[in-house]
Image (cartoon, rainbow, N blue to C red):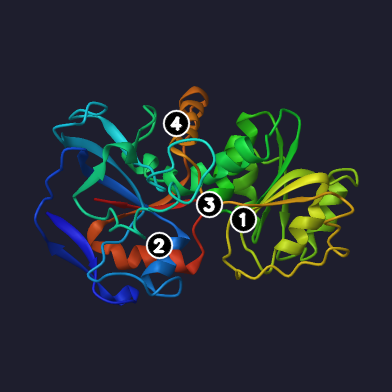
């Protein structure tokens, strides 16, 4: 079978190799991978800026969709032909995360899924939504589950609330779609008028161009009658957290869902009104398989379709990563296997 190998850190070190098809053990499932989507995490794992603790050759990719090819002798939950998608935090089945359930993440503590076949524990898969293509399904495990877990489970989003989304990456676009499906008002930020138009077409009620309005929290307050929003997911970290905190109302929710501008969070309890406004700052890192299944039901019921910017063939894996690194994409980048 074909598999993408990274021989050393650096996107120029990708190659496509022929390796043996794995055989599932008693409690494993052999999945024929159809598509893999890319996340910022994949980029920083490949370039070595996130961790140096990878074993080479390394197969990249955390988000994969496919079809069950075969099952181990003790597997009863799955059968050949089932359409499935990877659960990123493999052992987080339901409830709150703990040390054990937080111990295995696909493409980090394990090899990734950018190969024609992979073996996965029977608990490490979720049934794919029926209304989505394999390319669309592959976008869900990290970005969509993060947005769902943040808005529905952590922030407890309710009809009539206002959600602020930031940028046009996967988490933010899924947050927009989920919030609108839940009956919320959405204010979005972006860096260009062209992207602003696309966000409005997706259902955003208001859009702020942060390249023109750097202190965009003031604009958010203006658009909400001085109150602020109920919920926002901060995706940039260092450069955006201040505006995020100043954008929410009393008892507002700020989920830290990314760090594309840096992981340090410069906070001032008084300036950012953290204590006086009783603001909640919540760390986020995807969600459980139970959350994933609930998300998939909502996707089917509301016929939500992920935004796929571009699909690359497997042989153009390096080009896909370079495109991800430009930050020019609107939505998810997918590699067809």
How far apart marks 2 and 3 lie (CA) works out to 14 Å
In front of the other: label 2 or label 3?
A: 3
Q: Residues within 10 Å of mark 3 (few under 14, many from 20)?
A: some
User: Residue 225's spot in the image, x, y percent?
Assistant: 90, 43
Query: Which residue is painted at 20% across and 29% down in the image?
Result: 81
* Closer to viewer: mark 2 or mark 4: 4
Q: Position of residue 274 (x, y in %)?
A: 82, 56
Disc 4 marks which residue? 293
**Residue nearer the viewer, 184 or 102:** 102
Q: What residue did someone put label 3 on?
A: 285
Camera-side residue: 161 or 152? Answer: 152
Side (left or right) of 195 relative to 246: left
In this picture, is 19 found above or below 147?
Answer: below
**Mark 3 or mark 1, whichever is nearer to me:** 3
Could you tell me if the residues under marks 2 and 4 are in contact, i.e. CB atoms within 8 Å? no
Which circle marks residue 167 in the picture?
Answer: 1
Labels 1 and 4: the sequence-earlier one: 1
**Picture coordinates of residue 131 (x, y %)?**
39, 28
Q: Nearer the viewer, mark 2 or mark 1?
A: 2
* N-terminal-most mark, 3 or 1: 1
Of callouts 2 and 4, which one flags the residue occurring earlier in the amino acid sequence? Answer: 2
The local secondary structure at tag 3 comes to loop
Q: Residue at x 30, y 57 (%)?
A: 110
Mark 2–mark 1 Cα distance, whole angstroms, equals: 19 Å
What element does badge 1 sit on? loop
Q: Earlier in the sequence, mark 2 or mark 3?
A: 2
């Amino acid at each position: 079978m074909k598999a993408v190998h990274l021989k050393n850190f650096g996107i120029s070190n990708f190659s496509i190799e022929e390796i043996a098809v794995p055989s599932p053990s008693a409690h494993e499932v052999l999945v024929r991978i159809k598509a893999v989507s890319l996340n910022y995490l994949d980029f920083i794992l490949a370039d070595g800026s996130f961790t140096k603790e990878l074993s080479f050759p390394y197969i990249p990719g955390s988000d994969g969709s496919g079809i069950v090819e075969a099952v181990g002798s003790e597997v009863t939950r799955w059968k050949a032909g089932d359409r499935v998608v990877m659960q990123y935090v493999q052992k987080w089945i339901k409830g709150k995360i703990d040390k054990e359930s937080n111990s295995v993440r696909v493409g980090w503590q394990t090899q990734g899924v950018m190969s024609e076949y992979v073996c996965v524990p029977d608990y490490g898969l979720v049934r794919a939504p029926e209304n989505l293509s394999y390319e669309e399904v592959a976008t869900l495990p990290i970005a969509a589950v993060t947005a769902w877990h943040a808005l529905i489970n952590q922030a407890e989003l309710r009809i009539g609330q206002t959600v602020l989304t930031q940028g046009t990456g996967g988490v933010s676009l899924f947050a927009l779609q989920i919030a609108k499906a839940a009956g919320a008002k959405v204010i979005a930020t972006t860096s260009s008028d062209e992207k602003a138009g696309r966000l409005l077409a997706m259902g955003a009620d208001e859009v702020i161009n942060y390249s023109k309005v750097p202190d965009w929290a003031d604009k958010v307050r203006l658009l909400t009658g001085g109150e602020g929003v109920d919920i926002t997911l901060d995706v940039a970290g260092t450069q955006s957290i201040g505006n995020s905190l100043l954008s929410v109302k009393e008892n507002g929710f700020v989920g830290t869902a990314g760090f594309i501008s840096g992981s340090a969070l410069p906070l001032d309890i008084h300036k950012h009104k953290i204590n006086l406004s009783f603001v909640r700052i919540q760390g986020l890192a995807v969600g459980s398989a139970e959350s994933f299944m609930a998300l998939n039901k909502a996707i089917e019921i509301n016929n939500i379709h992920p935004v796929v910017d571009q699909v690359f063939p497997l042989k153009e894996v390096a080009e896909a990563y370079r495109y991800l690194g430009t930050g020019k994409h609107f939505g998810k980048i997918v590699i067809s296997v």
